[in-house]
């Protein structure tokens, strides 16, 4: 089954986050910002749609919402990445 466009966009954003995180990481932790729209696309795919695990990037071992559900936390082998909405 081919993921729909929304999931494909979310995966694209997640791959960009994973590529960028090593450049800003300190002590295995990184904070990355997305636009409001992009953050919600990722959030929908991870938490509101029944996105199959195999549709997500392999590097993501776990994910959850933290900080009152305003931050998406991604866990990879090397990093804990907090994804927030960029301040306007």
Image: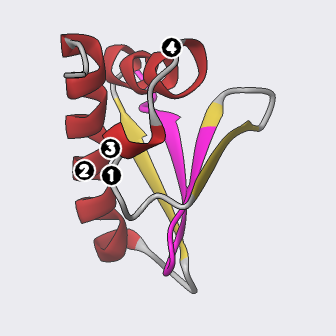
Tell me whether the residue at label 3 lies in contact with that at label 2, contact meaning CB atoms closer than 8 angstroms: yes
Q: Which residue is drawn at 38% across and 44% down?
A: 54
As drawn, which residue projects farthest toward the right? 68
Q: Residue at x 77, y 37 (%)?
A: 67
- Mark toward the start of the polypeptide (2 vs 4): 2
Task: Find disc 4 in the rendering and name its residue.
Answer: 49
The mark lying in front, picked from 3 and 1, is: 1
Q: Distance between the residues labelled 3 and 1?
A: 7 Å
Task: Find disc 1 in the rendering and name its residue.
Answer: 57
Residue 80 vertical position relative to residue 43 in the rendered view, above or below: below
Does 73 sit left or right of 76 as displayed? right
Q: Distance between the residues labelled 3 and 4?
A: 15 Å
The mark lying in front, picked from 2 and 1, is: 1
Q: How far apart are marks 4 and 1 (CA)?
A: 16 Å
Tell me whether the residue at label 3 lies in contact with that at label 1, contact meaning CB atoms closer than 8 angstroms: yes
The range drawn in magenta is: 72-88
On residue 88, the disc is none
Tell me the quadrant of the picture where the N terminus can be found: top left
Task: Find disc 3 in the rendering and name its residue.
Answer: 14
At which x and y percent is residue 7? 30, 22
Q: Residue at x 26, y 62 (%)?
A: 20
Task: Find disc 2 in the rendering and name its residue.
Answer: 15
Q: Distance between the residues labelled 2 and 4?
A: 18 Å
């Amino acid at each position: 089954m081919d993921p729909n466009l929304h999931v494909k966009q979310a995966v694209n954003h997640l791959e960009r986050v994973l590529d960028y995180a090593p450049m800003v990481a300190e002590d295995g932790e990184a904070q990355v910002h997305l636009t409001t729209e992009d953050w919600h696309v990722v959030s929908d795919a991870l938490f509101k749609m029944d996105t199959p695990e195999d549709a997500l990037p392999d590097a993501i071992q776990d994910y959850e919402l933290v900080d009152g559900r305003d931050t998406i936390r991604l866990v990879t082998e090397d990093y804990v990445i907090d994804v927030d909405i960029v301040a306007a």
